[in-house]
Image (tube, rainbow, N blue to C red):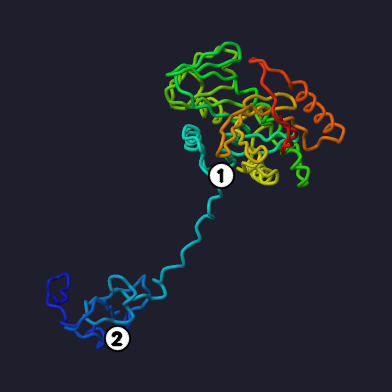
Amino acid sequence: MSEHRPPDGTQGAADPVQAAESAGGQPLGCGRRHEQGSRGNCVTGVAPAGESTSLARLQFSLVLCSCLCPAHVDRPGGLPVTSAARPSAPKPGPPPRGERWFQPRRSGFGWEQEGLDHVRELMPQVEPHRAWATFQFTGASGRVNECDLLIAVPGGLYLLELKGHPGRVVNHGDTWQFHDKRVRTLKNPLHLTDLKAKELKEQLTRAARALSEDPRQVPFIKPAVFLHDPDLVSELDEFQRTAVYGRNDGASGLPGIWDGLLGLPPERESRRVTPRTGLLLEKLMKHIGVSHSMAHLRFGSDWRLEPRALDAGPGWEDRLATRDDGLVKESGRVRIYLAGQAASTQQRDAVDRAARREYQVLQGINHRGIVQAVQIREHAGGPVI
């Protein structure tokens, strides 16, 4: 160990601790005497005589000593822990961030999940942003509605229908055709999405009343269609392009889903979705019972319905169905007559009569342009043919 040398280069005391103590100095640190040559890493300081032990005024000599001092073992580097140097308790961090993207399980369709992920990556994790993906709810009409994405942003509340068809999309009236390796044809999905949005708004308003909340605080739900294939090229005319959006990073010719819709400010300040509105929506969505249940996709004991409606109109919807009992496999088209949750006894009876009448009229008709009615049964939504 090297000796202590003053700045002027003169020979210093061989033991500064001993010298300071003999001159009436006050030991610092652990206050114990340490002899050189033993094992350890602690540092001991001594204040010269007459000096205050205040840390702000101390001028002390240090000696590297070689004992494992118990007062120093918890201090990295060997310096003693004094009351003035003791670290304060850590400050509590921010509260854990609440969930903003509600999707209990990933979509069973890879193309659909890819579109959902695109929106999720663009959505800021701050109030009032919230989103509910791949859920279903039962409307007041009794219709079971399958929804792709409901998203709350400062500019409003939107119900998005996702389509991942590739290729070039053109339209003939409200019929869309996607030209790729094969041609896919479908009706403009905005009309059915608008119907779902209205039924969802109605259910949320009913839930607000049931929970003693102001129903006027439930935002208007705007429908929109999101064509999210990265290589899509849109040739839709100006009428069919209404409320249709493409990827934010795409070259489809459509407005970007975020820059052209979800990221825009509200049309009027009175329609702004606030943090309080976001919390209210979360509460109401739980109350109306949005879920991923597939019970409505069963018809009888052996028929399985497709999750997406094939066609729909006032008071009815059609779905494709398949039956496989191990002996025979067949497919068909199921029409559900929507009696409605809030319907009176007279209204339900009228729906039942309409279903029976259509079933009876179709009996005995055998024509390739008319589907043949083979069964009539009850379903959660109403009578089914």
Residue lying at the far right in this picture: please name it. Answer: 346
Q: Which percent across, then down, holds residue 177? A: 52, 16
Task: Indicate which label's residue lies in the foreground, 1 or 2.
Answer: 1
The image quadrant where one finds the C terminus is top right
Classify residue 52 by image quadrant: bottom left
Tag 2 residue: 32
Alpha-carbon neighbours of circle 1 within 10 Å: few (<14), some, or many (≥20)?
many
Taking the image as shown, residue 203 lies to the left or right of residue 322, namely right
- Asked whether the viewer can see residue 340, the reply is yes
Identity of the amino acid at label 1? Arg
Q: Name which residue lies at 46% across and 67% down.
A: 89
Label 1, on which residue? 100
Give x and y (percent) for residue 325: 58, 39
Residue 120: numbered disc: none
Comes first in the chain, label 1 or label 2: 2
- 254 or 199: nearer the eye? 199
For the residue labelled by badge 2, is the local secondary structure a helix, a strand or a loop?
Answer: loop
In-image side of 47 versus 10 (left or right): right
Q: Residue furthest bottom?
A: 22
Mark 2 Cα within 10 Å, few/some/many (few <14, many 20+)? Answer: few
Q: Is residue 241 above or below residue 217?
A: above
